[in-house]
Image (cartoon, grey):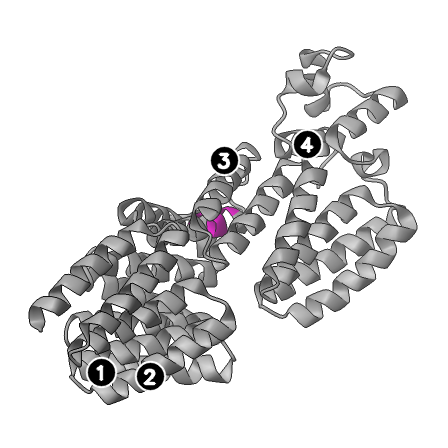
Amino acid sequence: MGGLGTRIRQLRQSRGLTQEQLAGRELTKSFISLLEREKTSPSVETLGLLSRRLGTSVDALLGSQDRLPEQVAAGLLALSAEALRKRNAPHAKELLGAVSILSRSYRLDETDRELVLQWAQVALEEREFDTASSLAAEAKTRAEQARDLWRTGRALLVLGTAALRRRDIPAAVQHLNASLDILRRAKASRDPARVEALINLASALVYAGDYTRATKRYYEAARAQVTQQHPVLRARALWGLGAAYRHQGELSSAIEALVGARDLFEKSEDLPDLAHVLHNLGQVAAEQQHNKDALRHFHHALRVAERLKMQVLHANVLTEIARVHVTLESLDDAAAFASQALSEAKAAGDPVETAEAHVVLGRIAFARGNPAEGTRLIKTAAEMFTAQGMSHRVAELAREAGMALLER
């Protein structure tokens, strides 16, 4: 980890402090500069002052070798973070339980900040979004008090991701933009959290209909240096890039990015994300009017989602299958799939997928010569999209409803 000067510089930069800010009134900028270059040594009183400003302990600042509880806790937290990256929430919870005992027994402030943040990530993985948001807000407050920019940025990432998964798009964009700003100030350009924030912000922008900015964010994430060491992160960036290209009608670029993501997910054996990519490949095939290919991709995604109990994705794919059957004029099949999608989306509490199922049912009603029912269903969907800040989707619905009436 280097000497005392290196540790002080790294902690100062991670807190977003200048040498002058760290010095305060008691010290000078030149003294901090000498200290970081290991050209001078601090007194005991100065060490205490610096440790408080940097939000750590004197022992941690000195790199003391008798910090066994703190070192054990750090090792367990690293293991739990790895478990969370692999979506193994039960194992992460076991490890965090052990860290909780150490933190309470030895009053490890920095450990405790990380602990709260990782419990928030566990709640996010288990789709307990209110709990995740509450814990992330607590982690953000603690990190801000300690001037811990890195954990402040990560807490905002959790808040933004929870909002995104609840489909609260304006809140997601706000939190994720703030997360990127803080992580940049923390000089965390090579931190996977920054790439995750880029990807999630881009996803929120897709929901908001801002496809141009979303594409730029996905592209930035895909080209980030950290993704070379994290293939799954690169795959997620490519997956998002493919979805954004699809929305802009650039279908050949969409296929290229999605196939790249699919191959990386298959190599990493990441089945949940693979299911999402198969779903997107099905959407591209459907837009190319390759209906057999679309149904093949959709049914493959459906099997994986069912196996992994991914209720929201399962509902989404059912809706897409129903859309293909509307195109094929197999209205009874379309109605069966759309009705099942609606039931599952409601059970999952996902307003966007509930609205999409209403859209397909509305199209079926128009196709069957029932414009009043079709209009009611489309209007209900429009109200849901409006509530989630998806005004672009409402405009698209108006065009779809107009086309459906013209076809009748």
Please indicate whether residue 167 sits to the left or right of residue 94 in the image: left
Quarter that holds the C terminus: bottom left
Q: Quadrant of residue 284?
A: bottom left
Three-letter residue code for mark 2: Phe
Q: CA distance from mark 1 to mark 4?
A: 55 Å
Q: Position of residue 393 (x, y in %)?
A: 28, 56
Q: CA distance from mark 4 to mark 2?
A: 52 Å
Quarter that holds the N terminus: top right
Q: Are marks 3 and 1 in contact (CB under 8 Å)?
A: no
Any magenta on residue 197?
A: yes
Q: Residue at x 78, y 36 (%)?
A: 56
Three-letter residue code for mark 3: Asp
Which of the two discs, 1 and 2, labels the residue nearer the N terminus? 1
Q: CA distance from mark 3 to mark 2?
A: 43 Å
User: Which of the two residues, 239 or 246, is positioned nearer the viewer here?
Assistant: 246
Q: Quadrant of residue 140?
A: top right
Q: Which residue bears the numbered disc 4?
A: 147
Vertical comparison of 312 with 333: above or below: above
Q: Residue at x 54, y 40 (%)?
A: 188
Please indicate whether residue 401 sits to the left or right of residue 28 in the image: left
Q: Which residue bears the numbered disc 1?
A: 325
Vertical comparison of 61 with 78: above or below: above
**Label 2 residue SS:** helix
